[in-house]
Amino acid sequence: MKTSVKRITLEVAILAACLTAQVPGAAEKARPLAARVQSFDKVAEEKAAWGSLRWLINAKLDPPSSLTLGDVTIKPGQSNPPHVHANADEVIYVLSGSCEQRVGKEAVILKAGDALRIPAGAPHVAKALGHQPLRAVVVYNTGERQFTPVTEKDAE
């Protein structure tokens, strides 16, 4: 009798877990579409000496998200800090301005309309060129982007 009670209890626990488990897309269906919209002018701006970031999509703003999307501005002549994202690739798409994008020991000039994928774990830094700020969209293939600063030497 004790064995059958344990088995029934286990079966009930498994059934309960299955019924409450999140099915992919279930969280999206539970929230109205309008509630999932993030407006540029309503999300917090993270200011830094070099420029600013606004996160529009990530797991903090939209918990089921498996992506991070942000708008970055780098002031003319300034650079964001050298860093790595150990848990995600980054895609940068330049909206306006231009930058020298260093990835490891290589560098490339990006201008409006250019896109570049930076592999996870690759040290990188962007420096805005000219007299205009760099404005770009950055996207990561995780909702919980990790950011680890590195030294200039480590970035090479």
Image: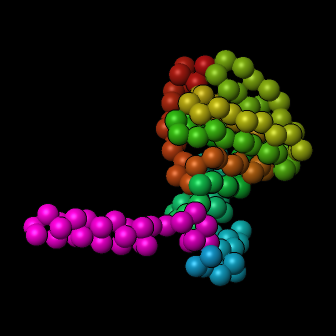
For the point 64% across and 38% down, the residue is: 89
Residue closest to the eye, 3 or 51 = 3
Return the residue found at the far front. 1
Residue 81 position, x and y percent, is 58, 37
Residue closest to the eye, 112 or 128 = 112
Q: Which stretch appears magenta?
A: 1-28
Residue 100 position, x and y percent, is 77, 31
When the figure is inspected, residue 35 is found, relative to residue 18, above or below; the finding is below
Residue closest to the eye, 118 or 134 = 118
Q: Is residue 114 left or right of residue 70?
A: right
When the figure is inspected, residue 33 is found, relative to residue 60, above or below; the finding is below
Q: Main secondary structure of the magenta part?
A: helix
For the point 22% across and 65% down, the residue is: 7
Return the residue found at the far left. 2
For the point 67% across and 55% down, the residue is: 69
Residue 12 position, x and y percent, is 30, 72
For the question of whether residue 61 can be seen, the reply is no
Q: Is residue 102 magenta?
A: no
Residue closest to the eye, 57 or 126 = 57
Q: Is residue 12 magenta?
A: yes
Residue 41 position, x and y percent, is 70, 72
When the figure is inspected, residue 32 is found, relative to residue 120, above or below; the finding is below
For the point 51% across and 27% down, the residue is: 151
Return the residue found at the far right. 113
When the figure is inspected, residue 139 is found, relative to residue 18, above or below; the finding is above
For the question of whether residue 96 can be seen, the reply is yes
Give the quarter of the image for residue 78: top right
| On-image quarter of the C terminus | top right
Q: How many marks?
A: 0
Give the quarter of the image for residue 43: bottom right
